[in-house]
Image (tube, grey):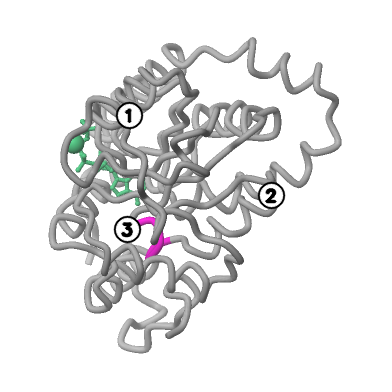
Amino acid sequence: MPCISEMEFEGIPRSHPRYLSLVLRERVVEGFRRGVVVAEGLIAHGRGECFDYLLGEETREFAVEAMRAAVAALLLAKHPVLSVNGNTAALAGKAVVELAEATGALIEVNLFYRTEERARRIGELLRACGAREVLGVDDATARIPGLEHPRGMTSPRGIYSADVVLVALEDGDRTMALRRMGKKVIAIDLNPLSRTARTADITIVDNVVRALPLMAKMAREMKGLSKEELEDILERYDNNRVLAEALEYIAGRLQELSGGKLVLEP
Ligand code: ATP
Ligand code: MG
């Protein structure tokens, strides 16, 4: 089975003005067919699409700033882990592997709707995307304190003992629980108002499909920086200001659009 984020989808005309958005839907649907994405994941994708429309479907400066801080945190970490769910694996599996390689982070499957079968399938998918090791498939034996149910289970070698954890499309409750364990949490979330976005230490308001490859590229470049330079980037970072800038950007863009001509010519 191929890596979904590298598949071509022949049914979609390349000339379509929303080609990329349609391809992303196909990736999530292909993930659903393979038992990698749950039905709830389809709904989460729709919510993400809505916020991406508000951002103009481009990576903005506030996201780039958060990515720089996030990469600095991953490079400085003793034990960084990338937490991957079904949507992220389907949308950007290849980029997850690239970021892990560029930062030395481990990859762990971590699911809100956890079943052993789905964890295994996501592990297989990530290996098809080039991952050498995927934690959280048959070693999710350590529970995050305060999280009942299978959603609280992590790998003792992965998220459970990590100092820095990157999450994408995460649930706010789990983000909070990771913070309570004393971990530094980096979130990629298109919704700047979600509990995850407002709980994380560093919030990247962008699509995982754009953010993860860009972060891998940044990590390769920033590897040459000294420990002091990386620490300096982190110290200057202010997540509250970055979240405010994301909201200001959306508000400003809507104001600008509503002042212009909204009807498209045929
Ligand atoms: P929270 O629990 O943090 O308040 P939520 O309940 O609103 O969040 P969830 O279903 O728990 O939402 O998580 C899905 C989140 O992932 C949503 O905030 C959505 O905007 C975001 N999301 C969906 N698709 C993407 C994507 N491709 N890239 C980045 N973020 C995404
Ligand atoms: Mg939630």
What number is the disc on residue 217? 2
Res 40 quadrant in image: bottom left
The verdict on label 3 being within 8 Å of ligand 1 is: yes
Q: Residues within 10 Å of mark 2 (few under 14, many from 20)?
A: some
Residue linked to disc 3 = 87
The residue that disc 1 covers is: 175
- When asked about the image quadrant of residue 199, the answer is top left
Up the image or down, 41 lies above or below 202; here it is below
Query: Earlier along the polypeptide chain: callout 2 or callout 3?
Result: 3
- Please provide the residue range marked out in magenta: 86-91
The amino acid type, in three-letter code, at marker 1 is Thr
Mark 2 and mark 3: span between their CA atoms?
Answer: 22 Å
Residue 262: in magenta span:
no
- The kind of residue on which mark 2 rests is Lys
Can you tell me whether the CB of the residue at mark 1 lies under 8 Å from the nearest atom of ligand 1?
yes
Mark drawn on residue 26:
none
What secondary structure is marked by label 2?
helix
